[in-house]
Image (spheres, coloured by chain):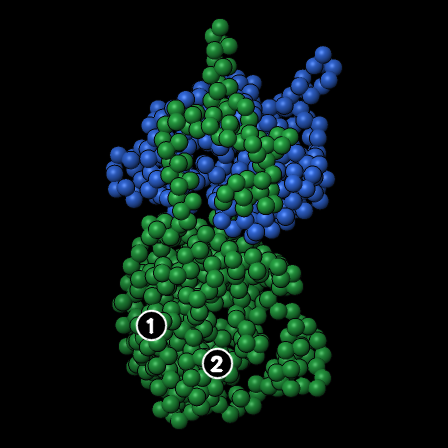
Amino acid sequence: MTVRVGNAALAPDFPEAAKKQLANAQMRHNVRYATDVIRAKRNRVVAEMPDWEALRESARQIKAHTLRHLNTYLEQFEKACTAAGGHVHWAKDADEANTIITAIIKSHGEKEVIKIKTMTSDEIRLNPALEAEGITPFETDLADLIVQLGNDQPSHIVVPALHRNKTEIRQLFLEKMKLENLGDKPEDLTEAARRYLREKFLRVKVGIGGANFAIAETGSVCVVESEGNGRMCLTLPQVFISLVGIEKIIPKFSDLEVFLQLLPRSATGERMNPYNSIWTGVSPNDGPKEFHVVLLDNGRSEILADEKTRQTLQCIRCAACLNVCPVYRQTGGHAYGSIYSGPIGAIVTPQLQSMQHSQSLPYASSLCGACYDACPVKINIPEVLIELRGKVVAAGGAPASEKIAMKAASFALSSSQRLAAAQKLVRIAQWPLLHDGTISKLPGFLGAWSETRNMRAIPAESFREWWKHRRKDQHS
Amino acid sequence: MLISLFITCYNDTLFPDTGKAVVAVLERLGHTVEFREAQTCCGQMHYNTGYQKEALPLMRHFLGVFRDAEIICIPSASCVAMIREHFPVMAADSADPRLIEEVNNLLPRVFEFTELLVDKLGVTDVGAFFPHPVTFHTSCHSLRSLHVGDKPLRLLKNVRGLQLAELPDADQCCGFGGTFAIKNAPVSSAMLSDKISCILKTSAEVCAAGDNSCLMHIDGGLTRQNAPVKCMHIAEILATTERENNPEDRQ
């Protein structure tokens, strides 16, 4: 099978996966704790911005404009980057991107690469593809390192190991780094990671990363990060490869002014990232001698073609929507079966796979709207979720019981006479289920409700009946 | 003022007392309430579950029923959100200029119950008496789609005898989400469980809201636990007066 989004095509449906995750009390505690901390920080630094709403609107407009003219800006980027000494490659899908990247590494006879955190590389399953060609990738972002060492999956877009706590990480490091002693303070853990990674930074000749932004005007690539590992990967290797989703393009260098205010505040609750790297092609005696950009489509053009769901591609991967999502906060990221989890994952993952897989994800939301409020580029995620639900239903993906229930409801609601008759009917039908005016066990698919919730008896008189009687009384 | 009530299909069937309370409050304030019997449903359940095609005839029906109604009062924030956010989208998708115009004409006439009282009628004290500790659940649609802000709370604060208990984590969803409560029942129940802990922390006797859909969910969990908290639509609290609550007056 062609890889589109990691292993999402093989993942179980959300309800099934969520049920399993809900039973993991430690993970739920970790996720709750971490998202509470990030949310509080985010709210603090957003509240101090008097022009936050104007910034969001600017960002939305810049992204919407760019997407409308994406072909132009991509070509402009290619030209500018090439003029600055970079090499630009175009990959239509995951396989093509993996082949291009592998070939670049092999052309230098290298067997190892160091990586900056890039979710896009997880999307195309780059690490397994490299390993299959005898190339060892080393993740250098702390959270990605934890995920890699634990043979785990990322559960959050910005903080991939968010589901793990300090004690679990200490245990993992002791085992995988073959350490005799290790404290459990965050400083102890980062120190261990630093020692483990340092010699790789100095030894490995090829670096790979993603991009937060790719600037059409100048051909520059921008990566923001907190740890400084990215800066090491960007300066020490001889060769650097950026894997860039085509939606990461912004037109002008000055557009960064908007995004670099929105992104750190939304992602980690910081006013500014500790490390902001922006580079253009190659420079003599500074950084890598060879620079490649792989522009990745992998389903993005199809999303672009749909005017109603195109806004999905505005995403700057800040994960603010995950941190506020009441569903994500219960289940964590693994329930989504994709490296893109939470509300944005629920719209990105199925669309990147042409709606062929992950059809349960658009339903993994109560449509509470917290994601839309938090989104720094104003993606109306609830609206897109509903649109995608429509696609699932149109493609025959809804359960038969639901289709029948919706048909019956359509019929009953098509006229007030039918509605009144249906009301009488359900009032009679409920009798066998009633005990002391309450229903505690419902039949069929409605039984899912009564697992945990009662249902009150349907009153003997509907409002419309009461109104009729009242009018008669008033007139008599 | 003549006010046309859109009761909503589930209030009509499951919560007729809410409709009676809306009528009582508006009539007490000196207004005339009409109920157009041809009304059925706004189409929200179909639309939100992915049956947009089936929602379209329901919207057309709604537009027909309320074409010449001057003010439409709806005691359900989620149905108002359906009308304000999705009717224009459906009309635009239909590319029918008449439908687009009809929806444009409809929107300024649609009011959620507390919006109608505070914004349109300029009332925050409806002369209610309800001597009980009450907490208020702001439904997601009233909070994020309608931006009702503190309108319901201002109305409740003016109710004689009512002690308002602030609900912790008030911006969190109760987990209902329409068909979400069935399709993702375990997650929905986990969200409900958090909401119920917050409600119980307030020690309120009554949990009120502007949406009976949330309340049906919350009440379903509360009664399953035999928790001593009653769920009431805000209209039912605002309809209660001294006479009904005072045992001496009743005699």
Amino acid of disc 2: Lys
The 10 Å Cα crowd at callout 1, few under 14, some 14 to 19, many 20 or more, is: some
The image quadrant that residue A23 belongs to is bottom right
Q: Which chain is green?
A: A
Binning the other alpha carbons within 10 Å of mark 2 as few (below 14), some (14 to 19) or many (20 upward) gives many
Whether residue A358 is visible: yes
Q: Is residue A113 above or below residue B249?
A: below
Q: Nearer the viewer, mark 2 or mark 1?
A: 1
Report the disc number at residue A93: 1
Q: Which residue is mark 2?
A: A115
Q: Is residue A335 left or right of residue A85?
A: right
- Quarter holding the N terminus of chain A? bottom left
Task: Identify the element where label 2 is drawn.
Answer: strand
Q: Position of residue A324 (x, y in %)?
A: 55, 55
Chain to which mark 1 belongs: A
Q: Is residue A322 visible?
A: no
For the residues beneath circles 2 and 1, the answer to whether they share a chain is: yes
Q: Which is more toward the observer, B62 or A403?
A: A403
Q: Is the residue under label 1 in contact with that under label 2 (CB below 8 Å)?
A: no
Could you tell which of marks 2 and 1 lies nearer the N-terminus? 1
According to the colouring, which chain is blue? B
